[in-house]
Amino acid sequence: MIKLEGEWKLQLDGDKQGLVLPFTDTIDLPGTTSYARKGPKNEEALISALTDEYLFEGQAWFSREIEIPVELAGVSCRLYLERTRMTTLYIDGKEIGSRDSLNTAHVYDLGGLAAGSHTVTICVSNTGYPTKGGHMTSPDTQTNWNGITGRLELQFFAESYLCGIRLTPDVAARSVRITAKLEGEAEAVLTVSAGSFNNAEVAGHVAEAQTYVLKPGNVDVEYILGPDALLWSEFAPNLYNLALAVSTGEGGPADLNELVFGLREFKADGDKFAINGHKTFLRGKHDGLIFPLTGYAPTDVEEWVRILGISKSYGINHYRFHTCCPPEAAFAAADLLGIYMEPELPFWGTVTEPSDDNHNQAEQDYLVSEGYAILQAFGNHPSFVMMSLGNELWGSRAKIDSILKEYKEFDSRPLYTQGSNNHQWVPEILEHEDFFCGVRFSRSRLFRGSYAMCDAPLGHVQTAEPCTLKDYDDQFVPPERVNSTDGAAGIGGEIQIQYGTEAKTVQADDASGEWIPHIPVISHEIGQYATYPNFEEIAKYSGPLKAKNFEIFRERLEQNGLTHLAAKYFAASGKLAAACYKEELEAAFRTKRLAGFQLLDLQDFSGQGTALVGILDAFMDSKGMITAEEWRTFCSDAVLLARFPKFNYISGEPFQADIELSWYRNISPDSVELSWSLAGESGTLSEGTAVAELPAGANYFELYQLKLELPVVKAMTSVKLSLGIAGTDISKSYDLWIYPDLSSAGLEEVHVFKELGEEAQARLDQGGNVLLMPDPDSLTNAVQGFYSTDFWCYPMFRSISESMNRPVPVGTMGLLIENTHPALRNFPSEEHSTYPWWNIVENSKSLIMDGTDHNWSPIVRTIDNFERNHKLGFLLECRVGEGKLLICPLHADKAAATPEGRQFLSSLTSYMGSEEFNPQTEVAIEELARIIR
């Protein structure tokens, strides 16, 4: 082998005019033109994604001299380019050929080269792809880079050698089937040996070497590892070094292939997946190859071990790659860590038949060939267990199913799905798919907690009063025959859908109606809870990608005089997003028929409007919202769950919770000891233990029904319910709130007005105190109260909703609360939204205060998104002449129907009756009239 990493000559050819000599620049490969900062600087500033500061699109020509030593002269060799775009190769000025795979290595057969110096020239083009390329080429993720980012080498081969090696594990026989092709004209002897190498906890296993006599052509042998062979799984990712040595006995050099192999069986088992006979629950994350320091995916194993290891520390055991396939290093790292991988064809579109309008046979053939290439290149990795045909595909179900059928006939090792969330509102399970990935079974049968407004109905995390009872098991069984207005049943004709980052009209004539899934179901892209940008992150973009979108968002905030709140916006929205994720994931774990989920996302998504939906930033660094340890309490192979109907209680009210356990560890005890406690600021209020039996073969256990009387309180009190399993790392906690049993909210004790009319103004003129509670329904200069944080990102879904003539999202990100303010003394709060605020927020609006005095600071703000950046006030006070005014646009009657609402209103009235009610900001009646309308 001759490695070709290092300095190459470079010529950029943006207009694709061809190579013009002499070369005028150099570049180090592997790498990209952008990473090397070659070409003109890009002065554009993207708002919807990161900006590639040295974006280059066109042809880049790379050239260098190589030296073939005498001993390798005439030896069969190939040029191997691991990760690139579309290439054309020239040797000594002669064109050898072209390759166009976006997912797999470009390999050129050069025959035998003469000894001495040769010129290798490679033209790489990143325009005019055979397909759009999904996240393989998207500026939203790894960018449309140009270069070669993986191994560059000349590979030399013996007179007889193996190619196309496929390893098929057989767990029952403790063996591996080896198929390949023996190139050459002579018979050969194949010697196979294997030894485990990566498990420090058990003794290594070395299998006995075995030999096989081979004839040129197809090879098919079985290698017995033996009864003590170690199995690969997420729990124990045991790997073998498998050596395949070919010799001809004619004195020629031997051919040696060393492969990493894992003995495992991953299959669908009813409504679950099973690894080596043990059921597992997929705790997945979406991945779009976002690497902001380089703009391209790494090709070294160590970096992927670091990345996947971070995800694993947050309980993740599965990766779904959105319209892309990662480099081989990612599979190698997943092999080491026990991560279940699902690459996906780089396609986000419509699969057509030849008779359909806009049919593109060349693109379809290319995509199908990419699937075969992915299977051939990476299929030996034990982590490669699943494969998808694309993202949110539409079109011919028959054609999609025929592609599945052909893939399964070619390679039955991975499990296949037709795509991720295909046919959106009108999905259907296809004959040849092994699992289903989507968000609904019909328009109203939902199985995730949040949706875009254009994709309504919204999910329970967005709309339902908080509780821990929700699961989706009832959605797996259709209701009585639905009418034609619901989802799939009889929908027919054209429907308008979200299609990527825009809207599209599609045909839904072939919808199948209501159906019951009979294969494992994975919930697609769950979560998508947005947080405000962290402008401190801007400095981290030291590579070719710059966060100019963040800079623009910061400038918008500055223009509205809110820059001083940026860090608090980031922290408060993040805490709310983490709480939303907790309920989202717990609902999935409470669902006995669900096989897993795929988060969108554990990390921020840099594009598509800038979707800051991660608890980690784009660099996979924590955003400080939640620790990995706490996240694993609701995202792990064993999760404690407490089912109870609400978070807010009256003093002395009975509390009941059904304690359950989701268990997908490889070893199950016969019983567990549950401990529980209820504690407040004064210490432990109640505690206990209970022993529960765990029936063999189950994955979901009802451990205990907890019943207790909540303490009698004279003030609003927060308590924590803590659960744990003795002798394990399994724990869980929930915050509850207890309120005094107030007979009224105390509004009768103050002067309450719904509008700033003559009577209210007269009282203010006389130096009186006024509580102004405008009717939210009558306000137009206001934003609707919405407890949950925004879905994905406001700019993208505002645009989609407008193009579909549907309501735009509310677009807010929770509350920022001045929790030390005396108005909230009797309603103690965090600085961020918590469940005592849910009913209050949902029955309110927040006033748009743009252009008001910067010193007029609301007591309770609503955080707006980074596109609008409104100054939003929910609870605010001011001085009007000699009078004092407290403003809260709230349906007081609806709030007062709940204990938390009565407590909030009581806190306001108590404040207004105290000497502490002393607003400092003077506001004119005319200014108030401008904003309260």
Image: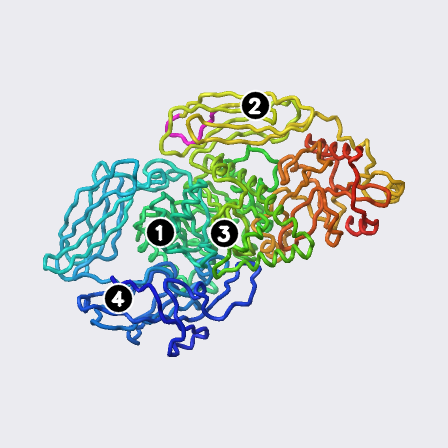
- What whole-number distance in Å separates the C-alpha atoms at marks 1 and 3? 19 Å
The kind of secondary structure element at disc 2 is: strand
Residue 907 appears left or right of 379? right
Counting from the top left corner in percent of width and height, residue 583 is at 54, 38
Q: Where does label 3 land, which residue?
A: 618
- Amino acid beneath label 1: Val
- Amino acid beneath label 4: Asp
The kind of secondary structure element at disc 3 is: loop
Quadrant position of residue 48: bottom right
Given this view, does label 4 or label 2 mark the residue nearer the observer? 2
Circle number at residue 109: 4
User: Sequence order check: which comes first, mark 1 or mark 3?
Assistant: 1
- The answer to whether mark 1 and mark 3 are in CB contact below 8 A is no
The kind of secondary structure element at disc 1 is: helix
- What whole-number distance in Å separates the C-alpha atoms at marks 4 and 3? 39 Å
Circle number at residue 301: 1
Q: Residue at x 57, y 46 (%)?
A: 484
Q: Could you tell me how many numbered marks the image carries?
A: 4
Circle number at residue 684: 2
User: Sequence order check: which comes first, mark 4 or mark 2?
Assistant: 4
User: Sequence order check: which comes first, mark 2 or mark 3?
Assistant: 3
Residue 448 appears left or right of 749? left
Q: Residue at x 29, y 73 (%)?
A: 119
- What whole-number distance in Å separates the C-alpha atoms at marks 2 and 3? 40 Å
Q: Count neighbours of disc 2 (C-alpha within 10 A) and say few if under 14, some if 14 to 19, many if 20 or more.
A: few
In the figure, 683 relative to 274: above or below? Answer: above
